[in-house]
Amino acid sequence: MEGSAVKIRNSLGIILTVALLGHGTAQSQSHIDLSGDWVAEWRQANVPNGYARYARFALRQTGSVLSGDLGREKDSLTGSVHDGQIELHYKPTQGAEIVYTGTLKNGEIVARGTAPSDSFIPPSALRAYRDNSSQTTATTHTFEPKAFQRFFASSIPPVLHIAPGDTVRTWTVDAGGSDSHNVRLSAGGNPETGPFYIDGALPGDTLVVHLLSLRLNRDTAISDNVIAANALTPNYIGSLGPAQYSGTTWHLDRDKGLGSLMQPPAGLKNYTVPLRPMLGCIAVAPFGDASYPTGRLGSYGGNMDYNRLTEGTTVYLPVYHPGALLFVGDGHAAQGDGELAGNALETSLDVVFKVDLIRGDAAGGPRAENADFRMAMGIGGSLNDALQEATTNMAQWLQQEYHLDRYETASVLGTAMNYDIAEVVDGDYHVVARLSKQLLAGLSPRP
Amino acid sequence: MEGSAVKIRNSLGIILTVALLGHGTAQSQSHIDLSGDWVAEWRQANVPNGYARYARFALRQTGSVLSGDLGREKDSLTGSVHDGQIELHYKPTQGAEIVYTGTLKNGEIVARGTAPSDSFIPPSALRAYRDNSSQTTATTHTFEPKAFQRFFASSIPPVLHIAPGDTVRTWTVDAGGSDSHNVRLSAGGNPETGPFYIDGALPGDTLVVHLLSLRLNRDTAISDNVIAANALTPNYIGSLGPAQYSGTTWHLDRDKGLGSLMQPPAGLKNYTVPLRPMLGCIAVAPFGDASYPTGRLGSYGGNMDYNRLTEGTTVYLPVYHPGALLFVGDGHAAQGDGELAGNALETSLDVVFKVDLIRGDAAGGPRAENADFRMAMGIGGSLNDALQEATTNMAQWLQQEYHLDRYETASVLGTAMNYDIAEVVDGDYHVVARLSKQLLAGLSPRP
Amino acid sequence: MEGSAVKIRNSLGIILTVALLGHGTAQSQSHIDLSGDWVAEWRQANVPNGYARYARFALRQTGSVLSGDLGREKDSLTGSVHDGQIELHYKPTQGAEIVYTGTLKNGEIVARGTAPSDSFIPPSALRAYRDNSSQTTATTHTFEPKAFQRFFASSIPPVLHIAPGDTVRTWTVDAGGSDSHNVRLSAGGNPETGPFYIDGALPGDTLVVHLLSLRLNRDTAISDNVIAANALTPNYIGSLGPAQYSGTTWHLDRDKGLGSLMQPPAGLKNYTVPLRPMLGCIAVAPFGDASYPTGRLGSYGGNMDYNRLTEGTTVYLPVYHPGALLFVGDGHAAQGDGELAGNALETSLDVVFKVDLIRGDAAGGPRAENADFRMAMGIGGSLNDALQEATTNMAQWLQQEYHLDRYETASVLGTAMNYDIAEVVDGDYHVVARLSKQLLAGLSPRP
Amino acid sequence: MEGSAVKIRNSLGIILTVALLGHGTAQSQSHIDLSGDWVAEWRQANVPNGYARYARFALRQTGSVLSGDLGREKDSLTGSVHDGQIELHYKPTQGAEIVYTGTLKNGEIVARGTAPSDSFIPPSALRAYRDNSSQTTATTHTFEPKAFQRFFASSIPPVLHIAPGDTVRTWTVDAGGSDSHNVRLSAGGNPETGPFYIDGALPGDTLVVHLLSLRLNRDTAISDNVIAANALTPNYIGSLGPAQYSGTTWHLDRDKGLGSLMQPPAGLKNYTVPLRPMLGCIAVAPFGDASYPTGRLGSYGGNMDYNRLTEGTTVYLPVYHPGALLFVGDGHAAQGDGELAGNALETSLDVVFKVDLIRGDAAGGPRAENADFRMAMGIGGSLNDALQEATTNMAQWLQQEYHLDRYETASVLGTAMNYDIAEVVDGDYHVVARLSKQLLAGLSPRP
C-alpha cells in the first residue's frame, strides 16, 4: 500500500473542517471571553494513532454569542458560550457542517466535533489554544551548542525557542563532528546544531531562513580522494579497479579566500579553489514520527549540499510540526556541483541566521532566493525524478507569485531556465531549477 | 557530506576490536567466574552521540587467568581477574592490541579500552553482558495486538519478547487500520503489528522469518481505481486529464479463493482474480535512530509489497539493533506486479510465523526463499538502481552459499535469472532477482 | 528542437486528408474505369524532402461519376473523370475540403491537391496505385539466405516478397555470423535474415508474425563470462577490479533439451539449463531513413531479447514503410532475464514463420501473445521509461480490444499485471507487461 | 546479443595490427618508390559485411628495401618490393607478426595479410592509398546549401570537400526548414546543412570545429507553448489535463539583442529574453551504416541543444568515417536549459566555422571549450546515465591533457565541477560537465 506520509501530506492541504459548539446555558461563567486568536489542534476521535491537524482561527465574543472565522478562506464560525459550555458551528464552503461541543480547561478549549451521519465525516477531538505568536519583538539570540543531532526528527527536544523576526548567532561543527578548534564534539554524519523551535509555526506554513552570515572559523577542511562510483560509467568504474580511499586535508586561507591541499600530489601542487562557505544541511523536522539520518535530504530540506546556499541567501522550507524545528549544519568551505568526492571541503562555521514565517502558504518543496535568482529544489530517487520535482516546484512558484498560466509558464521556463545538479552522492539526487530575477522582472503579475 | 547511515552500516561489518583488561590484584573476589558466553556493547569513549557496536565473545576462567575468543574469526582473548579488577588483552588478526581494564558491576563487565597512541584507535567504553540467547526451547506465542505502528523505528518499545525457534500466532489490520470485523483500530498507512524483540539477535545477524500461515479473516478488501501516474508515460498521463479517485471494494470468496469487485463497472462484471494472501510489509527496525513511515521500504525490508511473500515463504532480514524488532502488516488478498493501483486488495490477515537467527552473517539486503526459488531483493530510487541492488544481492548470495567466482556467477545469472518488478508506487522501487532452486541444484559448492 | 521522428510518428496517426479531383472534359477516355481498391501515396508538394503518407481508398465509377471512401473512417470521396482528367473532392469529417486534379499515367493516378487558402493546408502531390494485396492465396516459401544485414533500415532491398497468409521456412546465423555448420557468413552484431517485403503492408498497419517453429540446428552456442557492469551496483563493480573477458562455449543436447558448458569451471561442472530456443531479434524497418545497428531495439522491435519470444508466439509490430520489411535473427538457445552476460546462448536456428496483416490499426509498440499471455513491450532509455511504455502499451491494448475505461483498466492491471525485465545490456532497456489470458477471459468487452 | 556498434566502437581504439608484405622478385618495377605517407584501409578477408579499419603509416624505400612505422605507437614496418611484388612485415608491440603480400594497382597497395595459424588472427584484405591530407593551405569556402538532411548518416554524399584549416561561410534553415526569408526549403525536424567532407579525417581522429560566427539573419523565431511532460512530475501532469498545443512566434530585436513574444499573453507582455544565438545541431556521421534522425543525439554529437555552443566556442567530435562528414543546423536565437518547451527560439542562422583535425586521438565523446571553460558532453537514456558519461568524459580529458591520476582528478572534480543540463526533450538526455579554465590553470601537467 502506498505510504501514509504521502497521503497525510496531501491531507495537510485540506483546510480543517471543524466546528466548535457549546450548549452550555448557565451564566455563571459569562466572565469567560473567548475573543482573540486561536490555534486548533484536531484529531480523529476514535483512531488511536492518527496525526493532528492544525488551523488558525479567530473568535469574537459578544455576550454569550460567538462569531469568527477559520483559516485562509475565512470560513465563518458561529456559536455560543453558556455556563462554561461552548458550542461552535462550522460550515466550510464545501461539505457538511460540523458542530463542536466542549468546555474551557486551563485556558484551552477542549471539545468534540460531530457531523451528520450521512456526511461520513468521523467524530473529532479538538484542543484549541491561544495564538500569541505574532506579539513578539525581534530579538538576537546567541546560542552555544552543547549537543549535536545525527537525525532530523520531531522527537528531538528543541534547544531554543525563537520567534519570527528573531536572529540567531551560533556555530556548527563539521561533518565529522569537529569544531573550530578541531575538537571532536560528536560522532560524524553531519551532526546538526538545533533544533530551534519557531514560535507560532504550524504545519502548512513556510519557514523563512535568511542566511545572514556564514563565516569560516578555522584554517582547515577535510575531504575525500575518490570520485563517487555512481557518477562514473559502470564500464569506466569496472576498468579502474578498487580505489585506495583516504581523507585529504585542505588549508583554508581566509584572507585570500583560497583553499589548497596541505599535502598536494604532484599534479595539484599549485591547485587552489576559491572559498565560498555554504551550509550543506538546513532542515525542518520531517512529517510525523519520521526520523531521517542527517545524511539524507527530502521535502524537509536536509543534506541538500547546494553550493549556492551561501551567505545572503534566503531559504524557504515547508513546516510539518508546530515550531517547525530548524536544524543547521554541515558547513562546506567550497563544493563543486554534485559533491563528487563524497565530501566537500568539510569545515566548521560561524552562522548567523534570521527566521520569518509565511503563514498558511506551504511551498511545494524547499526553495531559495538571493539577489540574482529564484531557486526551486527538486529531490528524488533519480536525477530524472529530481528534475521533475524541481521544474514542478518552480512552475508552481511562478503560478503562486505571478499567477502565470501553464502556457505563460512554458514560455518563461523554455527561455530562462537554469538547472543546477546540486548533489548526487547522498542516496537521493538534488536538482535545482533557477531563474534570473532580472528576467522575472519582465513578468506582469496578475492581481 | 555523505550520509552517516551508509558509513555506519559499512562499519557494522568490522569485527569489534576490543580488549578487556583488568589490573586488579586482590584475591578476595576470586569467586568470580567469568566463564561463559558474553555480548560486548562498545562505544567510542569520548564522542557523545556515537552508535554502539556489538560482538559475541566467550571466556574461560582458570583460577585468575582468562582466555577466550571473539567474533566469527575467533580472535584470541587473554587476561586475568584479580581482586575484582578485570584485565583483557585483545589483538585482532590485523591492527593494534587493545587493552581493556574494568570491573564487574551487577553481573556485567564495565571497562575502558585503550590502544597504543600511534594506532590512532580512540579509547572505548565497554559494557558486556551474559549471552543466554541460545538456551531456550521453542515456544508458540499467541499475540493479540492492541496498538499498531505507523513507523519502523527502534525507539518503539517491543510488544513481545520471543526467542529464535519460537512461533507467533497473531493478526494484522489492513492498510487503512481495520481489522477482521472491519473495525478501524488505527489510522492508515500500513499500521503494523509488533515490534517483536528476538532475544539474542545482534547487529550483523540475519533474522529468519518463516511465514507459516497467512490466512484471510474477512470477506472484503479495499483497493483504488486509478493507475499510478509514474507507471504510465508522461504524454499518456497528460492526455488523460485529471482522474476521479475513489476506493473500490472487493468481495473475497474464501472458499473458492477468488476475488471480485462488489460494485463492478460494466466491463468487469465477471472479472475475478485468484486470491494469494501475502504480507505487504515485513521489517526490522532500521539503523540507528531512523524512523521510516510504514509506507517506505529499504534494506530493513518494510513495505516491500512483493506478491511472492506468501504462506510458505521464508524471509531473511539484516539485523540493525539488539532484538531486531520485527514488524508485520499490510496484508494483501491479491496483488499484481508493481501494485499499480497504489493499493492492492488490502485486507486483514491471520498470521503465523516462526523466527530463527543466523548469527554473524549479515545478508546484503532482504532475501527470501520458498520451495522453488531463491529471491534477492533490490530496493532503490529508480528501477535501474533497484535492479543493480537485486543483481548484486543475488551475486553475493551465490558467492556466500556456493563460493562461485564472478565468472561462474555470470554463467548462472546469464542463463537462469528471473526478475520481478515488485513495487513501483511507494517512493522507492523494488526489483527482485529470483533463481530456480532446480537449476541451482546443479551447482557444485566449493568447500 | 524535438526530434522529427517523434513528430512524424505522431502524424502517422492522422488520417490522410487528401482529395482526388479531375477536371478532364474529353470523352475519349471514357473507357477508363477507376473502380476498385487503391493506395494513395501523398507528399507535401513544395517541400523537397518530406516523407510520404499512405491511405487505402476505394472508388466506384458510374459513367464519368466517381464516388468512394477513404481510410478506416470511410470518409466520402466524390468526383468525376472526363477526357482523361480526374477530379476528386475529399472532405474529411473535420477540416477543409481538398480537391485533387490529375490524370491516369501507367495505371496510376497522378494528381495535385489544393485546399482553400484559409485552411493553411499546403498543396500536395498524390500518386495512387491499385491495391492488389488481398488477392493472394497462402504460399509457403523456402528461403536460403545469402547475405545478412547488420542494420535495420528501409534502404536495404528486400530479399523476398511475401503476402499476408504466407509462410517462410528459413534459417538464421548466430549473433557472431556463424551458421549451423559453424561457418562464419557475416561479421557479428546480430546479422539478420531478410528483409522480407510483405505485399500490401502500409504505414499504420500492424504486421503479425506467427513464430511457427524455432529449432536448434547445431550442438553449440557461444556466450560470455562477465555480468554487464550496468546490472551491478557501482560500489560492487568498483570493488571487483577489471574483469578477464572471454567467450564461453555451451554444448546443446538437443535430445534432452539441456545446455551445459563445454569446459565448465569447477563450480559449474554439473550445471545445466533447459533449452528454450527464442529469437533475439525480430524487426520491421524503422521510420524514415533511419538505420539502426542490429544491436538496438525500439518501437520497430529489433534486438528485443525477450526470452518468451519462443516457438508458438505471435509478434505484432507497427509498420513504418510499404512492405514493412521484416528482419529476423539472433537466435538464443536459452537466455535468462536481462541477458546479463551480454550474450545469451547464441546459436543458429531453423525458423518457420507465417505473416499476417492487421490493416489500419497500428499498435502503440511491439506486442505479442501466446496461448497463455498477452504481452506488451516497453522500450526506453531507463527501466523506468521502459516500464511506463510497457504499461501504457498494455493499457491501450486493453482499451482497443475490450473498450475498458481507465478505471476498469486500473482494476485489471492492479490485480493481474506481470512485468518481465527482458533486456538490460543493449543500450536501451526492455520491460514487458504481461497479462494472463485466463484472467482476461473474465472481461466483458463493450461493443 | 549486445549491439555491434558498441563492440566495434571499442575496437576502433585498437591499433590496426596489419602488415604489408611483398614477395615480388622482378626488377622491372624498381622505379616504384613507395616512400611517403599512406592510409591503410583494412577488412577481414573472408567476412562479407564487416567494417573497415584505418591507420596511417609511413614508408621509406631504399632500393628494394622498405622500412617504416604505423600508427601513434610508431610500430616498425619492414619489407621489400621486387618486380612489382610488395611484402611487408608488421609486428606490433604485442601480438603476432602479420605478413602482407600484394601489388601496386593504380597507385594503391592491394594486399592480403596472414598471421600464424596459432594466433587466431583471421586473414585480412588491405587497400592503402597515399595520404595527401596535410598538404593544403587554408581556404575560405562560401557554401550555399541547396538541400537539407533530415538524418545523420555516412550514406549521404558530401556537399563539399574541405581541408583541415579551412573556413566555411554558410547558413542554416530553422528546425522547421525555413530560411532567412521564412521560405520553407525542407520538411522539419532539424534539417541540416552539409555534410562536409574533411579531407584526411579518419576514424579515431577528433574533428575540431571552431564556431567563428553565429549570426541571426531574420527577425523572427518559432517556439512552442507547453512544457515537455517528462520534465514535470507525473502527478502534476495528471492534474493539469490535456494541453492546447500551439506555436508561438518571437520577435528578434537584433540591435538590442532581445527577443519578445509577438502576441504575448497578458502575463508576458513585457517579457524579454537576451538573444544568444547557438547551434542546436552539430554532428559527424555516426558509426557504420547507422542513420539517425536529426532530432537525435549521441557520441557523434547531433541534436545536443546546448546553449553554450555559441559563437566563439570550439567543438570536438570523434570521427567514425573517412572525411568525418560534418553536419550543422537547428539554430536557436535563445534557449533555456533543457529546451523545456520542446522547441527553443528556432530560427535560421548565418554560420561561419573553421575545421581542424586532431589525428589519432579520439575523444571519449563530444567536447567543447571557449575562453572560460572546458566542457565534456554526456548523452544517455536517463539523466543519471548522461551524468555518468559526462563525468567520465571529463575525467578522461583531464587524464589525457594533464596526466592527472584518479585521486588528483577527484580533488579537481570535487571542488570545481559545474554541471549543465543541456537537453531533456529529445529522447536522450544531455548533461555537460564544465570546468573553469581559471581553476585548471593551477594544474601541473605531468610530462
Image (tube, coloured by chain):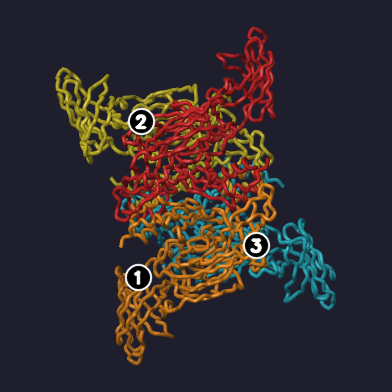
Chain colours: A yellow, B red, C orange, D cyan
The residue wearing badge 1 is C72
Q: Amino acid at mark 1?
A: Arg
Q: Chain of mark 3?
A: C
> Residue furthest toward the bottom?
C28
Q: Residues within 10 Å of mark 1 (few under 14, many from 20)?
A: few
Give the CA separation, mark 2 to mark 1: 59 Å
Using the image, determine if residue D359 lies above or below residue B80. below
Q: Amino acid at mark 2?
A: Asn
Residues D374 and D140: in front is D374
Give the CA separation, mark 3 to mark 2: 65 Å
The residue wearing badge 2 is A49
D271 to the left or right of B395: left
Write the residue at 59% across / 14% down. B104
Q: Is residue B299 visible?
A: yes
B235 to the left or right of C148: left
Is circle 2 on the same chain as circle 1? no
C127 to the left or right of B385: left
The residue wearing badge 3 is C219
Q: Chain of mark 1?
A: C
Q: Nearer the viewer, mark 1 or mark 3?
A: 3
Write the residue at 62% across / 12% down. B32
SS label for mark 1: loop
> Residue furthest toward the front?
B255
Is circle 3 on the same chain as circle 2? no
SS label for mark 2: loop
Name the image quarter holding residue B51.
top right
Where does the image place residue D190, in percent across and percent down from the top left? 47, 63
